Amino acid sequence: MTLIERIEAAEEGSRELDAEIATDVLGWTFKHITEKGGARWTAWWREFNGKKYRVQLPHYTTSLDDALQLVLEGYVFSISDATKKARANVWRLSATNETPPDYSKAATPALALCVAALKARAETGET
């Protein structure tokens, strides 16, 4: 099952799915840290202009604000939760007024937006 298929099938968002988006799609890296005394946590890094920066892992699959970070610049989106499954689509706004792609469906609006944004990224090859 692909990442997109797993998000479509999920009943709710999860930190595991958030981590897969960050590593598999965005190319982020992480390291599990165990401190003296046994406290454990995960440190995340993303590269920008050839430098690595420590960042917090967004809640892509549970927060619409964070899921919006996956929408590429120059793209527009729509979201609906008027049916049993939430729906979203993401497409590039153009002068030709192309028809938006079919809606992506998932259990929650954040999951649906993640699916639609990841499909748009896959079509362009951008991460």
Image: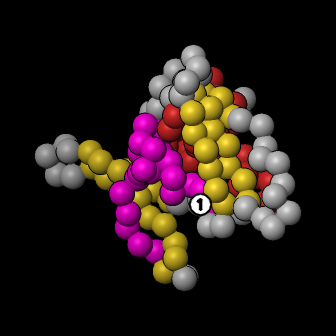
Q: Which residue is mark 1?
A: 27
Q: Which residues are magenta?
A: 52-72
Q: Is residue 62 magenta?
A: yes
Instruction: Give the camera-side residue of 12 and 48.
Output: 12
Q: Provide residue 122's location: percent of width, then percent of height.
A: 76, 52
- Estimate how packed mark 1 is, as few (under 14), some (14 to 19) or many (20 or more) residues with alpha carbons within 10 Å: few
Left or right relative to 49: residue 103: right
Q: Provide residue 18's location: percent of width, then percent of height.
A: 49, 43
Can the viewer see residue 118? no
- Seen at 52% across and 72% down, the residue is 47
Left or right relative to 12: residue 103: right
Placement of 48 over or under 13, stated as above or below: below
Q: Is residue 10 magenta?
A: no
**Quarter residue 71 falls in:** bottom right
The secondary element bearing badge 1 is classed as loop
- Seen at 41% across and 59% down, the residue is 44
- Seen at 64% across and 56% down, the residue is 76
